[in-house]
Amino acid sequence: MKREFNGNAPTGTQPQVEAAFPETIHEEEEMFRKMALERYLQHMSYTQQNSENSSAVSHANNTAPSASARFQEVLKIGQGSFGDVFIVHDTVSGVYLTMKRMQLLHRPGERYKGLYNATARELFLLRCLKHENIVELVDYHIDASGALKMYMAVVAHDLGSLMRIWRHKGPRGEPSKGRMPLSTIKCLFHQLLSGLAYLHSKAIVHRDLKTSNVMIDEKGVLKIIDFGWSRYFPPKCPAKLTGPPCPISYRPPEVLITGKHKQSYDASIDIWCAALILFEMLSGGKQLINASSEAEAASAIVSLLGSPSSTSKLYYGTPQVDITFKKNLPRRLAHRCQLIHIDSDAVDILERMLQLEPADRATAASLLDHRWFTTPPALCLPSEISLPSTNTYRWAKS
C-alpha cells in the first residue's frame, strides 16, 4: 500500500498539557501514580479535535467511544513485555500511524486503575521530549477495554533491516561492499548521537538502545524509539535501578558484573550501546559482542578490550559481584577493526566509547564534533540516504 503519511499530526489541535521533570526519584514515582489515575478518570482521551477551545475532559466524554472506530488496525508488527504494536489507519486525517497498545493494571470497574510504571514513564517521557531524532507521540487515550493506546508516526525502516539489505546490494540496486556507504553510516550515527545528547541533557537514560530501536523515516531522518525501559535520572538524586537493561550482547561490563542485583549506572550505558551499534554498521551487521549469557558477554568483552585496571574499585572492589574479570589481558579492539577494514578515525570513536570504566567514556555531545564525520567521505545529508522504495506496511492494504 502506498503510505500517505507526510510527517504531520492528524488535523485538529492537541490539548497542551504542561509537563515538568521531577527533581527526585521519589517525586517521579509519586507523579507517575497520580498521573495514571488522573488520566484514567479523564478517560485518557487527548484525541485531536476540531475545536481548539474545548477542554481535554469534555473532549474525552465526546470522543472516547469513537476512538476505536477512528483508528482502524491494519497490521500487527510487534509484541513486547508491556503490549503489542500495530499499524493503524486514522480515518479522519487519512494517515497511517504506529499504535502501541498496553493494558492497565486493572480493568474498568475494579477498585484501582493505573498504569505499569514502565508504561507510565514511556507516556510521560514522550509527552515531554521534542527532538528531531526522537519518535513523536501524536496522540493517546484509553479505550473501553482498559487498554492504553499511544499513537506515533510510522517510521518505515529499522536500522537492522537496512544493514541486511546493504550486505548484497543497495536498496535501489547500488553496488555494495557488504555494508552501507561510509557517508551514510556517518550521517545515521551523527543523528543517533544528536538524539542521545538531547536525552542525556534532560537527564534521561534510554537503557534499551539496539538496532531494532533505531528507525529511519522516508526522509532519512533517524528516530530513537521504544522508551519503555527509559528512566529520568536526576543527578541530584543518585539511585540504584532494578532489572538488567538492554539485551545481554549490548550490556556494558559494569552491569554484567552485578547480575540481578540493584545497580548504579548512568547515561554512559547508552554510549556503550551506541558504540556497539556503530560497530555493527561498520562491519556490515556483525555484532562486536555475541553472547547468550552474562558470563559469555563478559569473556568476550575482556578478550577484545583487555582487563580492567588492577586498581579498579568497580571491577575488583565491588561486593556481590557475580562475574569476575581475568587480569592482565591486552586490548585488541583496534586489531579487530583493522581486520575488517574499519578506518583509524572510526576506531578512535569506538575506543572513546568502549571504555571499561563508565566515567572514562566520551559523551554523546562531545563526539558530535569528532573529525571522523568530516574526514572524506564526509557524512551525507539525511535526504541523500538511499532507502527502499517500499516498506513492510505497503502490502497490508488492498
Image (spheres, rainbow, N blue to C red):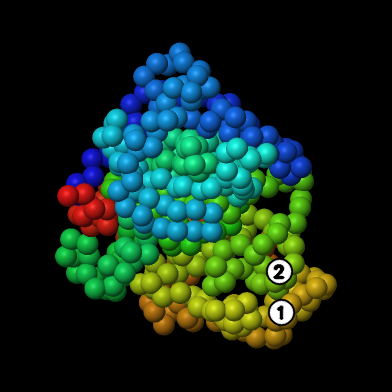
Q: Amino acid at mark 2?
A: Lys
Front residue of 377/74: it is: 74
- The answer to which quarter of the image holds residue 305 is bottom right
User: Which percent across, then down, holds residue 350?
Assistant: 51, 67
Q: Amino acid at mark 1?
A: Ile
Front residue of 73/300: it is: 73
Name the element at disc 1: loop
For disc 1, the neighbor class at 10 Å (few under 14, some 14 to 19, many from 20) is: some
Front residue of 259/300: it is: 259
Front residue of 51/113: it is: 113
Name the element at disc 2: loop
Q: For mark 1, what is the residue?
A: 323
377 with respect to 260 (left or right): left
- The residue positioned 68% from the left and 39% from the top of the image is 111
Q: CA distance from mark 1 to mark 2?
A: 11 Å
The number of callouts visible is 2
- The residue positioned 67% from the left and 56% from the top of the image is 266
User: Which percent across, then down, holds residue 185?
Assistant: 36, 61
Q: Reply above or below: 248 against 108.
A: below
In terms of sequence position, does the residue under pointer 1 or pointer 2 come before the other?
Answer: 2
User: Which percent across, then down, holds residue 165?
Assistant: 27, 67
Q: For mark 2, what is the residue?
A: 260
Residue most extreme to the top: 53
- The residue positioned 42% from the left and 30% from the top of the image is 65
Q: Reply above or below: 57 against 4.
A: above
